[in-house]
Amino acid sequence: MIVLGIETSCDETAAAVVTDEGKILSNVVLSQIESHQPYGGIVPEVAARAHMETTDQVVAQAMNDAGIGFSGLSAVAATGGPGLIGGVIVGVMTAKAIALGQNIPFIAVNHLEGHALSAGLANSDVRFPYLLLLVSGGHCQLLVVKGVGEYRRLGTTIDDALGEAFDKTAKVLGLGYPGGPAIENWAKNGDNQRFSLPRPMKGRPGCDFSFSGLKAAVKRTVDDLPPGQLPEKDISDMAASFQQAAGECIIDRTNNAIAIFKQTHPSARHLVVAGGVAANKALRGELEKLASSHQMALVAPPPILCTDNGAMIAWAGLEKLKLGETSGLDFAPRPRWPLDPNAPKAVGAGIKA
Ligand code: KG4
Ligand code: ZN
């Protein structure tokens, strides 16, 4: 089976062709970063327009690189949500048109499920159930992945996502968008103990996260530094101090999640990290140590499969296709689409600092 996957839920227009054996025949990612940079963050209208202008070309490129014609496709998958709805509509409509034209199934994929299952594309040894830390620009969750479409959420952020905290910190430090890779780079030469920053939720029971207090503390601390252009040393030290504090929170909450996960799945061996922030090497290193202290192995997809891409959507589409789960052409794009519909709303969720 060969599936075309289309991803348009945020600021990347992406398409990829993947086989059911996990071979990536093509993987095209067109970033809109330059269009959003002047605003210091993603502007939904700008994103929607850019997806409209480029999705056809990105799909054509992916098909060309794969070296197969549309008639070689078994199905076409697209992110059906959650995400910026204008972009999601563009991807879904493109996929539906191809499905209709080729008379092949259309599969709407939950973007978070794309991230969640990307571990299986990167590493064929991963078996359900596994514990998943999903850290991206819009989400920060710990989930038990019992199987395709079967998720139990153990924790989520009650305010900001981790990627959002990286991006805001980078903005305060004048490092531009997206902030994650910039913070990681500047942190390499920084003193991670120089600035004393809070570790929200650390030491508390449960697996929920909170990053708005950390974000606010970064801003306050930087505002208190002498006015004018920040010296490079201050930027490095703040990037390192922030990354250290955020990392400690993640490790603390994941440690609690492992204990809960092991109660019901004592022989499960895999901790998976996915989503854009999973590209962060310092975080991966800490998670690796944590996993091995619990006789578990960390599985982290290569960075190109951590940030948004079409291959993870094609792969999730393939997993659903194997189960005979396809979508109707009347599927309506979803701005919200929780992986675990039974999870209660996190206490304090939605309150933005
Ligand atoms: O998964 P993703 O590409 O898009 C969403 O679904 O949100 O994640 C994007 C997020 C951004 O916040 C970006 O700053 C962050 O992932 N990110 C990183 C790194 N690379 C991307 N954060 C920390 N370190 C990185 N190396
Ligand atoms: Zn994503």
Image (cartoon, grey):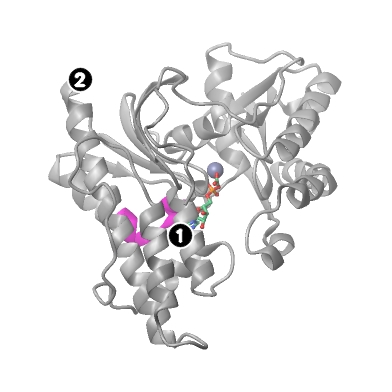
Considering the numbered disc 1 on the image, is that residue within a helix, a strand or a loop? helix
**Seen in the image, is 155 located left or right of residue 82?**
left
Task: Give, as a three-letter code, the residue at label 1.
Answer: Phe
Q: CA distance from mark 1 to mark 2?
A: 33 Å
> What residue is shown with label 1?
166
User: Magenta stretch: residue 262 in it?
Assistant: no
Q: Position of residue 218 (x, y in %)?
A: 39, 67
Position of the N terminus, as image quadrant, is top right
**Seen in the image, is 331 located left or right of residue 253?**
right
Q: Is residue 218 visible?
A: yes
- Choose the circle earlier in sequence order: 1 or 2: 1
> What residue is shown with label 2?
264
Considering the numbered disc 2 on the image, is that residue within a helix, a strand or a loop? helix
Q: Nearer the viewer, residue 333 or 105?
A: 333
Up/down of 109 relative to 299, above or below: above
Up/down of 330 relative to 95, above or below: above
**Seen in the image, is 195 located left or right of residue 90?**
left
Up/down of 55 relative to 236, above or below: above
For label 2, being within 8 Å of ligand 2 is answered no
Foreground: disc 1 or disc 2: 1
Query: Which region of the structure is painted magenta?
Result: 277-284
Label 1 with label 2: CB-CB less than 8 Å: no
For label 1, being within 8 Å of ligand 1 is answered yes
**Seen in the image, is 122 located left or right of residue 8?**
left
Q: Position of residue 352 (x, y in %)?
A: 49, 47
Task: Give, as a three-letter code, the residue at label 2.
Answer: Thr
Q: Position of residue 160 (x, y in %)?
A: 45, 47
Q: Nearer the viewer, residue 154 or 121?
A: 154
Decide: few, some or many residues near mark 2? Use Cα within 10 Å; few <14, some 14-19, many ≥20: few
Q: Position of residue 237 (x, y in %)?
A: 34, 77
At 67% from the left and 15% from the top, the residue drawn is 327
